[in-house]
Amino acid sequence: MTTTTTAAAAAAVRTSPKAVSRASQRQDPAATDGRRRRREPAALSSSGEEYLTWLAVEQGRSRNTIASYRRDLYAYESFLAGRGLDLAHSDADLVESYLSERRLSGRAPTSVARALAAIRGLHRFCVEEGLAESDPTEDVSRPRRGLRLPKALGEEEVVRLLASCGAGDAISLRDKAILEVLYGSGMRVSELAGLGLSDLGSDTGLVRVLGKGSKERLVPLGRYARRALDDWLGPAGRQRLAPKRWARRGDAEAVFLNARGGRLSRQGVWGVLGKRAASVGLGGRVHPHVLRHSCATHMLAHGADIRVVQELLGHASIATTQIYTRVSPEHLRRAYEEAHPRAGPRAAQ
């Protein structure tokens, strides 16, 4: 493991101390409470910065992951600073106390688990780099994370949502393509927003997707998604929104554009789904990950192999994909009755 990186790479994972402080205050309201004033570090420690740089450069972690880890580590170091301590003087009891404080403040189990992952990763990094003699998180147990089942839409609800883009104007063609591609491929919203024209290939029916950790995979598109994408990329769609002169060079390659002719952002995709869902009575239930969940759930319900779904969604572990097998007990029972020799009517004969 090495911490030698270019100045540009290191700068890519740094933010200003003021920005970090504002993010920490948003995460922990107690930081702004005058009754609990604490001494906070001016910025993340040098060890913390080296660790984040290592994650970004050598592990290929995404910007969103780095930003989340930065907030978690700054909150942890602020907790230590409030007790007049730093990373070198932390111990298992302090880590447990910090996690307990997170839980009592209303943090979800997943947020507490992520905080521990960031803290544990930092301390292990310090030990392996010779910056510390021991890891205080070795004896800290991982928080129990309750089983959270994906909230998939029913197939009839998906049909209603896809039918919400009936008009033939450029925005409607774009929104239709977004909905069809998200549901038809199971892409993450960040993957869809990052699509470039060169990623669409030719006649293979496969789209190149850049997933988490900058890992590429090929994703097939069904006939409905391909048709919607072709309509959007035709004269009545994308060309109507494309500007005569691109504000940013990279936007010219973007598959999906906003009304101003720039690349559609992740937030823009959220807005599209919210608007279309509200128009068919599904407001508040639909966001990009719901369509991803629905894609996986419906494929498994129709007999897809779980390994195929894992590859389609870009899950590194089959355990992540297996959660979708729990959302359809009817499918589980039907498959059991059809496969087990003593489960169905045949067993009584």
Image (cartoon, rainbow, N blue to C red):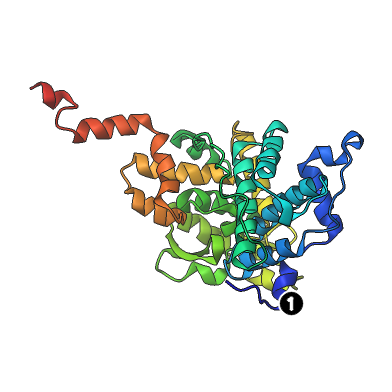
In terms of secondary structure, where does tag 1 sit?
helix
276 relative to 127, above or below:
above
Between 202 and 61, the one lying in front of the other is 61
91 relative to 279, above or below:
below
Name the residue furthest front: 133
What's under tag 1, amino acid-wise? Ala
Q: Which quarter of the rendered picture does the C terminus lie within?
A: top left
Between 241 and 343, the one lying in front of the other is 343
Name the residue furthest left: 349
Tell whether 187 sits left or right of 296: right
169 relative to 53, above or below:
above
Note whether residue 236 is visible. Answer: no
Tell whether 110 sits left or right of 94: left
Total labels drawn: 1
Q: Residue at x 60, y 59 (%)?
A: 124
Residue 205 in percent (x, y) is at 41, 64
Residue 166 in percent (x, y) is at 57, 44
Q: Residue at x 59, y 41 (%)?
A: 110
Residue 275 in percent (x, y) is at 66, 41
Q: Which quarter of the rendered picture does the N terminus lie within?
A: bottom right
Mark 1 lies on residue:
7
Q: Residue at x 52, y 44 (%)?
A: 291
Note whether residue 52 is visible. Answer: yes
